[in-house]
Amino acid sequence: MTAQSTRHIFLIEPAEFYANPETMETNVYQVDEHEPKDTILKKAVREFHGFRDMLVENGVHVTEVKGSVGCPDMLFPNWVSTHEDGMILYPMLNHSRRAERRQDLIDLLSKSYNLLHDMRDWENHDMFVEATGSLCLDRTNKVAYAALSRRTSSEAARKWAKMMNYEIEIFETRSHTDLPVYHTDLVMWIGTDVAAVCAECILPEYRQRIVDSLKSKRDVVELTALQQQAFCGNSLEVLGENGARMLVMSSRAHEALTEKQIKQLNKHFSRLVHAPIPTIETYGGGSARCLMGELF
């Protein structure tokens, strides 16, 4: 059976970090507080190191590389996914994000993974799907969930599913600003036997189908819209020592969970682990799951 989660995480330390104006058009969670760029970077790197150390202290294996100047979102590795039989390279909407796919990093991953699919040229046809940001994967049952946005096109998601022999569940969302949620991994996460979803963010005509699909295979934690805005949906199941399942999130997300939800989650995880990453969340509009590339 295909494993849902891994003990090995790929992290990219930012060489430059600020609220990227190119991505803010679709990412409504980014906020530019207009601090000096060197101040923002220092705070973000400090948070990144704390997050990395939290993973290592909890028995997670980490492969860490340095990002590039000119790529302020590179700490979010949305250009690649790995699978038990290889890796995939993805088409990115924003030009500044396409530069994140450095050849030396592709070569590094190629030492462990065969290239299954190179989808980069889909950009020339305005077809975008940004790895596990766009696709929330039930790896065990081979079902992919995709929330449509400018970064996730229906055609690209369906073609990916056909290539990977996955079923695909496509739906639409509305954020607190009425724009679509830019990535699926802000709306939901899937673990081995539990998942979480913000049904309030899913348009009514899709809502019940998506919730029922998740509940058919797992216990489901339902998140409120306010919890979604606090990045509770941007969590990830990761394995620690002896295969212990942990749920990784930001401290902001952890603080937004109710006691009832924590009790429900504790039935499925050895622990909930978190670290404060407020600068990354504010300027980058992404949280814990966005930082972690899974290495299978």
Image (tube, rainbow, N blue to C red):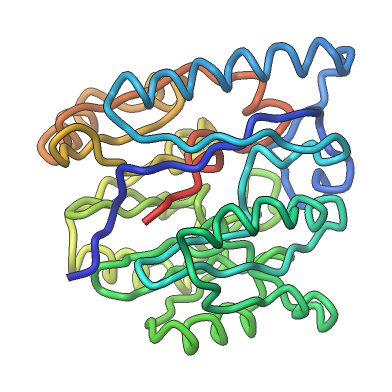
Report if residue 224 is visible in the image: no
Above or below residue 136? Residue 233 is above
**Total tally of numbered discs in the picture:** 0
Q: Quadrant of the N terminus?
A: bottom left
Q: Is residue 12 left or right of residue 247?
A: right
Q: Nearer the viewer, residue 187 or 44?
A: 44
**Residue shown at 65% from the left, 37% from the top:** 75
Q: Residue 105: x, y in percent? A: 66, 51
Q: Nearer the viewer, residue 201 or 250?
A: 250
**Residue shown at 69% from the left, 12% from the top:** 43
Q: Residue 145: x, y in percent? A: 44, 68
Above or below residue 91? Residue 259 is above
The quadrant where residue 237 appears:
top left
Residue lying farthest to the left in this orientation: 267
Q: Nearer the viewer, residue 217 or 290?
A: 290
**Residue shown at 38% from the left, 83% from the top:** 167
**Residue shown at 57% from the left, 62% from the top:** 131
Q: Nearer the viewer, residue 112 or 230?
A: 112
Above or below residue 236? Residue 197 is below
Q: Residue 294: x, y in percent? A: 43, 50
Above or below residue 74? Residue 82 is below
Q: Is residue 176 left or right of residue 275?
A: right
Residue lying farthest to the front in this orientation: 111
Q: Quadrant of the C terminus?
A: bottom left
Report if residue 280 is visible in the image: yes
